[in-house]
Amino acid sequence: MNKMKNFKRRFSLSVPRTETIEESLTEFTEQFNQLNNQRNEDLAQGHLQLAQLGREVAADGSPVSPPEGQGRSPVAAVRYRNHGQRRCSMEASAGDKRLSLPMDIRLPPEFLQKLQMESLELPKPLSRMSRRASLSDIGFGKLETYIKLDKLGEGTYATVFKGRSKLTENLVALKEIRLEHEEGAPCTAIREVSLLKNLKHANIVTLHDIIHTERCLTLVFEYLDNDLKQYLESCGNLMSVHNVKVRGVQGPLPCSSAWVGGFGGWERLEIPSPSTGTGRSCLQPPPGWHRCKDERLPAGTATPWGHQCPLSGTAPTLVEVSITPSAHGGPLSPAGTPTEDTWPGITSNEEFKAYNFSQYRAQPLINHAPR
Amino acid sequence: AQELQAFRDYGESWYRSRKGLESRFQPREPLARQPQVTAEARCKLVSWLIPVHRHFGLSLEALCLAVNILDRFLATTPVAADCFQLLGVTALLIACKQVEVHPPSVKELLALCCDAFTRQQLRNLECIVLHRLDFDLAAPTVSFFLEHFSQVRLEARGADAGEAADA
């Protein structure tokens, strides 16, 4: 603990002026607000924006904004294209200023213009940020782009609304996560977003857009008529939950999984429902899944049912198959003896020939596995 | 044993998927546009974060992710020297929320900074960091690759031992 205090102190010594922390943070917050403002800003209303910024400055008594206000004046047409780049330059100049100039200085407009021009000429590749900026010009990342319709449900940490996107006219599901927590953004939300962003699969509900404001985080999902539980009920409990779990990542199942967070069946799957994460999040399939037991299957062949694990195209199959008859003590597998039709190349496989299997016909899967 | 089995089954494809993501999460010149934060300051912050993560009993993964978040944020935004430490704990907090079962509480983290910052400041900064990184937090880390390669090694040794026993 002593050591702890030591390094506490060591660091705090290197922090020079505590009284400016608030200032720098204000600057951060301003940048953040600017981000939001810029997104919300209607191109035609450039002047309004200017006035508004001016007022902000007066309120804070901070000199950060006025030069930026100046920089904002170029004609609307130019500004549309240079949105992203200009933002970078604004930040850069704000940063430089803090270092080299006294706080109360007001730079002459010509000089600023020049600065602006210089930074515009810098050839910059379209960064992630500026790509996002240009997307936001179209309307992504803005709350106004989506019309809230009915409320679909409410959980402990989020409320889900049905909505419509003004951009595509498609129905969407809007999941509103409140951010007013003692501990900051809830870890469930952080994981849900960061994991879903990397997942694209027919059975995993698609995350279209994220709207991040100070108070609340809204996730825009594709809209589906049922959630998994409703779908199962509508099937009259024909399917056992276990099989649903298997199917969830394999075959088509026309419903949403992301907002069935409370549905216990998904929890062991881990993939579709990051929001249920109480443990370490991980994209590794749980140990309960099996790959082909028989390693003698030629590499790269799919099983007779052609299932592929969705996490990556080359992943092992999730269905247990074996071409040795003894494994099931009977016929090969419900898919029957492989033929050239179901498994091209199999009849020329030496090992396959050596077994000299009798011909079994494929049987309906329903005999072997209840739905 | 279960871990090893999971590795046998999925290690390779998991590795490939993470490897594929690696370049997307690499911070590009994090200090290039920093007017105040120097390489020395960053070094100091990181060597401070190491005992902090040990103090909370956090995983190496969390630490690596925190540094990755820190660097990627630095690449996007100029940071003043006086809230650099706050950025450090914020990155650590976000990393823990992503990969730990029990992330340390905001209060504990603030206490480690000698209460130089307020809860609200930390929350604001967290919000900004998340926004800037666009919630891209599932970065493949040194910790992951280290673990993968040691598993590969273990596996290979196991196979050798197995063959020796057979012979």
Image (spheres, rainbow, N blue to C red):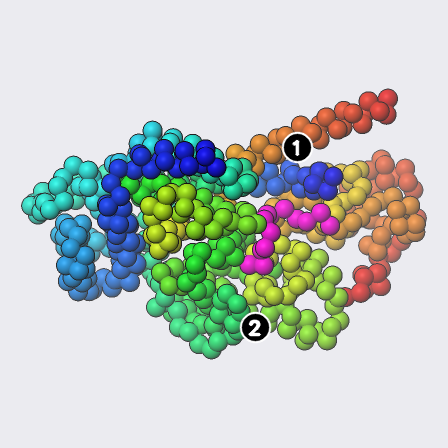
Seen at 78% across and 49% down, the residue is: A320
Which residue is nearer to you in this view: B22 or A16?
A: A16
Of all residues shown, which one is farthest toward the bottom? A150
- Give the vertical position of A106 relative to B71 (above or below): below
* Tally of numbered discs: 2
Q: Which mark is residue A225?
A: 2
Seen at 41% across and 43% down, the residue is: B112
Give residue A93's quadrant in the image: top left
Seen at 69% across and 41% down, the residue is: B3
Give residue A274's quadrant in the image: bottom right
Q: Are marks 1 and 2 on the same chain?
A: no
Q: Is residue A368 left or right of residue A219?
A: right
Residue B16 at x, y = what percent? 58, 38
Residue B91 at x, y = what percent? 42, 44
In whole angstroms, how far apart are the C-alphas of marks 1 and 2? Answer: 44 Å
Q: Amino acid at mark 1?
A: Gln
> To which chain does the residue with label 2 belong?
A
